[in-house]
Amino acid sequence: MISQRQSDPGQDENDADRLRRTTIPQVMSMELVSAFAGDREMTQRERTLICEHERNRGSAFYSEIFFAISHHYFAPEIAETLWNNVLTHKHIISERLGRNVRITVATLDYLSNITSELKAPTLISEAYISEIVNLSMRDRMTGLYNHSTCYELLELEFRSHRRYGTGVSLLLLDIDDFKLVNDRNGHQEGDRILIELANTLIEQIRDSDICCRFGGEEFVVILPLSDDPVVACEIAERIRTKVTGISCGRQRITVSVGVAVCDHATTSPHTLIEKADQALYKAKKSGKNRVVLGVVSSL
């Protein structure tokens, strides 16, 4: 792990002292750093400022960039390497989410969640808060909602069902023989298939439906305001059919789908997922590449 603090622990020098010694705040503004990182196209004046500042500041240049973003000091001897790592991280998550993730978000995410360099990240402007929240809710590879967010969203739909009687159904999908795909073709090819499947889900669902990556090769689709098992199974079948268009070499990709509909016997979101999981298990045992409707039995 990269060390954030390089000074003698006995010294009283703090981040503000280091900043006074190493940076010129009016030059290294957050706006300039953002442009330098590729958040937008740089103007000619900004290019000139950056070039002059990098030449004048030498090894302190990248330390000042990090201070402008996070208000934390990183020693010059490690700051440039760290900066390159952050830019790579920004590129990866931007590509996977299909949009440009700003350097502020990418830096705080990398330093907090990847390297644990920042135990208490500095609060940033309100303009970036929604982007950070959205990033924390999403699976980085597919851009779909992640496991924990899936439960939170399903909990909201379940409360609406209990209070107002609105319907909610659930599809639990699993890629058939996905381990063989990874073993034969490598994990990079497996990642491509996961991303293609995620895109297929988004294309086939209704505007009100919610797609999540539940974990590994499992995906969940929440169907709000839907208590009709026929409709739920039709959506699941449409997805299953479209997925067969995804291939890996000569191997056709298929999914098994378990469908569960919330009714009076459904006591919690976990119960609904369990019923979908049982239906998925039956689909697998029955030969895979099929849709099975689960029955929520009466208490």
Image (tube, rainbow, N blue to C red):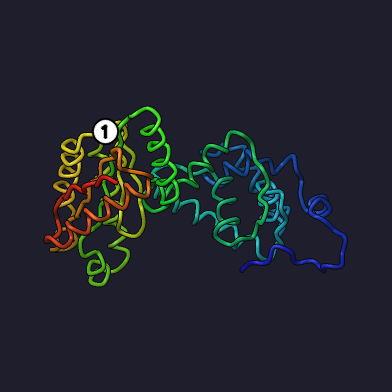
Secondary structure under the numbered disc 1 in the rendered image:
loop
Q: Quadrant of residue 118?
A: bottom right
Placement of 16 over or under 248, stated as above or below: above
Q: State the residue at coordinates (29%, 40%).
A: 262
Residue 280 x, y percent position in the rendering: 22, 55
Q: Mark 1 belongs to which amino acid?
A: Ser
Q: Is residue 196 visible?
A: no
Residue 252 x, y percent position in the rendering: 14, 59
Residue 233 x, y percent position in the rendering: 17, 42
Q: State the residue at coordinates (41%, 40%).
A: 153
The answer to whether 233 appears left or right of 267 in the picture is left
Q: State the residue at coordinates (41%, 46%).
A: 151
As rendered, which of 297 and 205 lies closer to the eye?
297
Placement of 287 over or under 274, stated as above or below: below
Q: State the residue at coordinates (42%, 41%).
A: 155
Placement of 87 over or under 263, stated as above or below: below
Total count of labels: 1
Q: Quarter of the image for the N terminus: give it.
A: bottom right
As rendered, which of 141 and 233 lies closer to the eye?
233
Residue identifier under label 1: 226
- The residue most toward the top is 164
